[in-house]
Amino acid sequence: MRYLVGLCLAFAVNLAHAQAPVIFQDGTAQDQRLGDLKTLNGFFPFRPVGDLAAWKLRQRDIKRRVLVSQGLWPLPTKTTLNAVIHGRVERDDYVVDRVFLESIPGNYVTGSLYRPKNKTGPFPVILSPHGHWKDGRFYDAGLETVSKQIKTGAEKFKQGGRFPLQARAVKLARMGCIVFHYDMTGYADAVQLGHRPDRWDHLDSSDNWGFMSVQADLRLQNMMGLQTWNSIRAVDFVLQLDDVDPTRVGVTGASGGGTQAMILGAIDERIAASMPCVMVSTAMQGGCTCENAPLLRIDQGNIDIAAATAPRPLGLTAADDWTVDLETSGFPDLKHVYELMGVADKISAVFHTRFGHNYNQVNRAAMYAFFNEHFELGCESIMEEDFLPLSQSESTVWSSAYPEPSGNQIGDLHETRLLAMAAKDSDSNINRLVSESTEDLQSYREVIGGAWETILGRRGDQVGIVNYNETSVTKMPQVEIHKGLVRNVTHGEEIPVLRFVPPQKTENRGSVLWVTNDGSKAVITDGKATEEILLLVKAGYTVVVPSLFGQAELAAATEEQSQRMWFQRGGEKGWHKFSGYTYGFNHCLFVQRVHDLLSVIMHARSDGDVCMIGLGKVAAPLVAAACSQANTMVKRCIVDPRGFNFVSVKRHDDPMFVPGAAKYLGFDGLLSLAFPASLVIANDDCPTARNIYAASKAADRLTILNHDIAANDLLTQLQFED
């Protein structure tokens, strides 16, 4: 096994050490995090559930993870759409209007609006995101391609085969549906941003940043989130149309459009039926930066996300691509979920795996049948007929009357303005939740607490089975030093610890979990415990000092410590350097260390009450994070962050990089969630924690000091409640 310190981030090692396994004191190397990083090309089976109640909790978590990952928890402020509908093109039995609207002030969603002709509404409406076909909404497959497809049975008509994206909109309009066929960013008329901003090392300062940057990821601002927001606003737009039936709103797309359809169906309850095609599978999860985001697929995959649509109708198609095994891998799990919910008739799939990746006429026919049934369209025939396609000049929304964006409306200036606007809105919405009012407490905990629960990925009640394997004992006059491993059997993790145990005659006051910046080596000098440790032991505390993932025995073989990153190969430009390819599938190092602390807390409880101490820029945030998820397992926390702020992190491979940390109030936000534990905070005002503890009627459990904590202060603060 290659030496990879970290499921998501292993510390980089030089070639001389790259093959060296990590051996623990007892000769074992069992930590599952030493394996390869998980990537979008991995295997993503559905996580099974036992009953309906368990599924509903799981479904809630899936939806929240999707929303958090997209920067949409809570939802941004919905501003005026300022939709413009113009330039109608007439056909015999349908019409097409050109549309542009503002999903965010100054940011345009563009598309074609197909309507039935000579029919009376209200009409069902289908959103139609296009996916990664060349030129998007303007896609033309060409005569040569369509001739081959007609021979294989993939297509029936030349026009439908050449213009398959238009073909599905035309047929749905003929069936009596309104269709909004809208552009992905960087395609067709969506000219303001490139589809893949292939950069990660510029536009990245604390007051001016763009997509792919550290600052953007600290706030969970990503291209996928922008597209998801565009889709949500597209739903808002179609529901404002006078002749739309709001109970029959559907979405369908293939490939990257299938990803958008899958996501929108999962998170937006206004979607009454969803058909994401040739995308949902247990294999490749989506290769574009617009299909990946930090946090999105940790402990879940596309099957789980698609399942979140239940009990609303869900239709799928498979092809000779990464969905080829859908019939036996993934689809049975989806059927089981729908059966649990008592709606087995609301899920369907077709498996035309003789065709390559596509949304061809065969699969389009399955889609027509799906919406015909679930939207009760009453169409006797779902067979396509030929049509006169729109030319690009008939499709484009930009004209002399409505010129396309230019100048500071496109490129870097537009991008940085967009993200600054989004950050300001997010800060306003989140700060509005911070209150000393008990009535507002539930909303705060649901939003901020829920977000951090998603980011950190493990609560105290999810720690599982933990045991302790002692490897050596060194007896000294004032203290016994026990060396061993805390093993989390449930999650396959190991944490080396030193336990400083008082002599048996000393009164047992419980455990102090002492977290350091560097692991256990920080509390041993010349083979002896430091003064602070001895002082606590003399007072009757068992002091437990863990070496967290990446520290001590698990430290890097070189002095350069950086989280290992995985990038996606793409096109002539080589690697897409996007953190979502790593942190979208794997926990960051900080989070894995928090998991270690929760395991050690569980172990330390055997010695009585647990108190935690974290002094330093690494230790204090880790203690705050662990305490936020520990619930009642921790009695008291003493922290001094020494000026640390998550916003100050400059690199994706920094051990303190945490996607979303800046969005959700950082260190202060974590401490605000530590209740019911008592807190002692040094050198940091933490106004959010003050307000939330006051709202919790626990202001007396919060002490804020304006000076460093000395050794004697520690003892005083620990014994405050004894």
Image (tube, grey):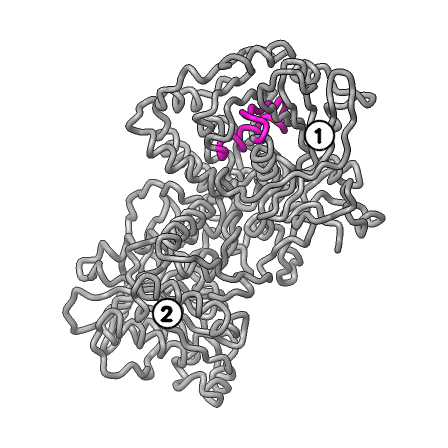
Q: Is residue 138 visible?
A: no
Circle 2 SS class: strand
> Residue lying furthest bottom in this view?
151
Toward the viewer: 657 or 47?
Answer: 47
- In the rendered image, the quadrant that contains the N terminus is bottom right
> Residue lying furthest right in this view?
16
The residue at which mark 1 appears reads as 498
Q: Position of residue 238 (x, y in %)?
A: 26, 57
Q: Is residue 145 left or right of residue 88?
A: right
Residue at 24 percent across and 56 percent down: it is 239
Q: How many marks?
A: 2
Identify whether 676 is placed above or below 451: above
| Cα–Cα gap, marks 1 and 2 | 55 Å
Toward the viewer: 527 or 696?
Answer: 527
Q: Is residue 464 left or right of residue 31?
A: left
Question: Crowding near pointer 1: few (<14 within 10 Å), some, many (20+)?
Answer: many
Q: Position of residue 54 (x, y in %)?
A: 39, 53
Q: What stretch of residues is rendered in magenta?
A: 606-630
Identify whether 447 is placed above or below 361: above
Residue at 57 percent across and 25 percent down: it is 612
Q: Position of residue 405 (x, y in %)?
A: 41, 51
**Residues at badges 1 and 2 in contact (C-beta under 8 Å)?**
no
The residue at which mark 2 appears reads as 315
Residue at 43 percent across and 24 percent down: it is 688
Residue 614 is inside the magenta segment = yes
Question: Crowding near pointer 2: few (<14 within 10 Å), some, many (20+)?
Answer: many
Identify whether 273 is placed above or below 551: below
Residue 628 is inside the magenta segment = yes
Identify whether 441 is placed above or below 553: above
Picture quadrant where residue 690 is located: top left
Q: Amino acid at mark 2?
A: Gly
